[in-house]
Image (cartoon, grey):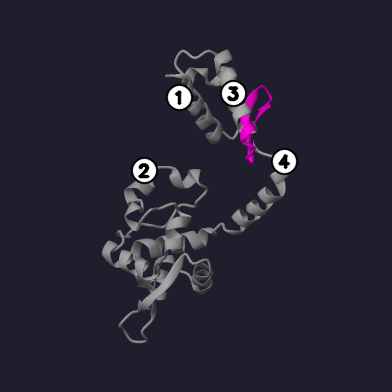
Amino acid sequence: MDDREIKSILETFLFLSEEPLEPDKIKGLLDGVASEKIKDFFKELKREYDDRKGGLQIAEIAGGYQILTKTEFAPWVKKFNLVRLSSRLSKAAVETLAIIAYKQPLIRSEIEVIRGVNIEGILKNLLERRLIRIIGRRDIPGRPLMYGTTKEFLQYFGLKELSELPTLKEFKETEVIADQGVPELPLEGLEGPEQGVLEEEIHEGD
């Protein structure tokens, strides 16, 4: 590896780490790179961030290095955190949203059969957040409203398209849900979404 590649790798480590990185503790991740060399690279990265005069800085803390926001941007960080906290979904909302994502289009009574509780308030909340939308009426007595997910749903969960929804097997075999703080979802018995129909419904909302 050349010096530029090593610096890029170290910058990646800094981005991923929630704790200060100590050169001695990460040298094993970089074949044959000494601790002093790693420390020099961190110092170079620190100077580059300082010269850029952006919103981030690399600070030397407790014998290690860490990417932090600059103190002058603290009010903006606080505002962002308030928005992020207010945007979190409750366990009940996530469970309902998962059912809609995997079974759409479907009506309220079908969701309530699966969840076993009244979801009127949850549906209202998901509609207000634009994570679901009304996509038509079911051609049965009473013509109940049908619900499906939106482009905002894809953005919220970092999906490019509906085909990227994890399979039920992937939900069970990975710990992604736990790592992201998302509660385990009641997906037993659900099939994958009807892709063609769903994509058409989403594009109609563009």
Residue marked by disc 4: 71
Judged by depth in the image, the label closer to the viewer, 2 or 3, is: 3
Q: Amino acid at mark 3?
A: Glu
Give left or right: position of 187 versus 49.
Answer: left
Q: Residues within 10 Å of mark 2 (few under 14, many from 20)?
A: few
Q: CA distance from mark 2 to mark 4?
A: 41 Å
* Residue 68 against residue 148 in the figure, above or below: above
Q: Which residue is mark 1?
A: 5
4 or 1: tag closer to the N-terminus = 1
Mark 1 or 2: the one toward you: 1
Position of residue 41 measured from the top left corner of the image (x, y, whole percent): 56, 21
Q: Residues within 10 Å of mark 3 (few under 14, many from 20)?
A: some
**In the rendered image, which residue does mark 3 sit on?**
44
Say which mark, if any, is on residue 75: none
Residue 20 seen anywhere in this rendered image of the structure: no
Q: Residue at x 58, y 13 (%)?
A: 36
